[in-house]
Image (tube, rainbow, N blue to C red):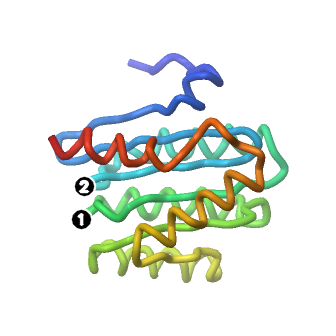
């Protein structure tokens, strides 16, 4: 069963995908901002919406800024890392920046492997405050005023209940 195409408004408000052990929240903001968050387990079912969001960003803008909150992600399916990395690598020249926050040593190891494949593209943050600072600078520079840290924090709380 296929999912009907999402509207631009749905992408801006944020889409979510729940899996038995984890949750994805993802926003596509004009112009060229992709923000996503994975909490608990990074399920392979998250590949499709992440890649779809990246493609949507690339259709709207010549370059993309990515902000990835994996601070609360503790494990992941290797297919998530390999397929998302492959999609990013295919579009590497059009990725202006990629900021990611990690806490788990296991996830940090996977992020390091992906970063090597991407030629050191990632700015890896070890604390949420510096990641949020980069996110706020990125959204401000892009002229985006309808997204704030509270959107990420709200999704974090939603999963932890």
- Quadrant of the rendered image containing residue 40: bottom left
Q: Is residue 13 left or right of residue 82?
A: right
| Viewer-proximal residue among 36 and 48 | 36
Q: Residue at x 26, y 44 (%)?
A: 157
Q: Secondary structure at mark 2?
A: strand
Q: Residue at x 60, y 66 (%)?
A: 134
Q: Is residue 139 left or right of residue 161?
A: right
- Quadrant of the rendered image containing residue 45: top left
Instruction: Return the mark for residue 41.
Output: 2
Count of marks overlaid on the render: 2
| Callout 1 crowding tier (Cα within 10 Å): few <14, some 14–19, many ≥20 | some
Mark 2–mark 1 contact, CB under 8 Å? yes
Q: Residue furthest right?
A: 62
Q: Quadrant of the C terminus?
A: top left
Q: Is residue 11 left or right of residue 111?
A: right
* Cα–Cα span, label 2 and label 1: 6 Å
Q: Position of residue 66 (x, y in %)?
A: 61, 57
Q: Is residue 109 above or below residue 79?
A: below
Q: Secondary structure at mark 1?
A: strand
| Callout 2 crowding tier (Cα within 10 Å): few <14, some 14–19, many ≥20 | many
Q: Residue at x 63, y 46 (%)?
A: 54
Q: Position of residue 4 (x, y in %)?
A: 51, 16
Q: Position of residue 108 (x, y in %)?
A: 36, 77
| Viewer-proximal residue among 90 and 30 | 30
Q: Residue at x 31, y 55 (%)?
A: 42
Q: Quadrant of the N terminus?
A: top left
Q: Position of residue 147 (x, y in %)?
A: 58, 41
Q: Which comes before the other along the chain, label 2 or label 1? A: 2
Instruction: Return the mark for residue 74.
Output: 1
Instruction: Return the mark for residue 115.
Output: none
């Amino acid at each position: 069963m296929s999912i009907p195409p999402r509207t631009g408004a749905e992408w801006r408000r944020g889409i979510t995908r729940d899996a038995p052990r984890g949750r994805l929240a993802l926003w596509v903001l004009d112009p060229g901002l992709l923000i996503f968050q994975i909490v608990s387990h990074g399920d392979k079912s998250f590949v499709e919406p992440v890649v779809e969001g990246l493609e949507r960003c690339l259709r709207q803008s010549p370059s993309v800024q990515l902000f990835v909150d994996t601070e609360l992600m503790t494990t992941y399916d290797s297919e998530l890392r390999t397929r998302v990395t492959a999609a990013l690598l295919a579009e590497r020249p059009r990725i202006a920046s990629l900021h990611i926050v990690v806490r788990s040593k296991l996830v940090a190891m996977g992020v390091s492997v992906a970063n090597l494949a991407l030629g050191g593209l990632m700015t890896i943050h070890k604390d949420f405050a510096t990641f949020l600072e980069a996110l706020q600078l990125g959204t401000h520079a892009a002229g985006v005023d309808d997204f704030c840290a509270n959107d990420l924090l709200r999704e974090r709380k939603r999963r932890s209940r």
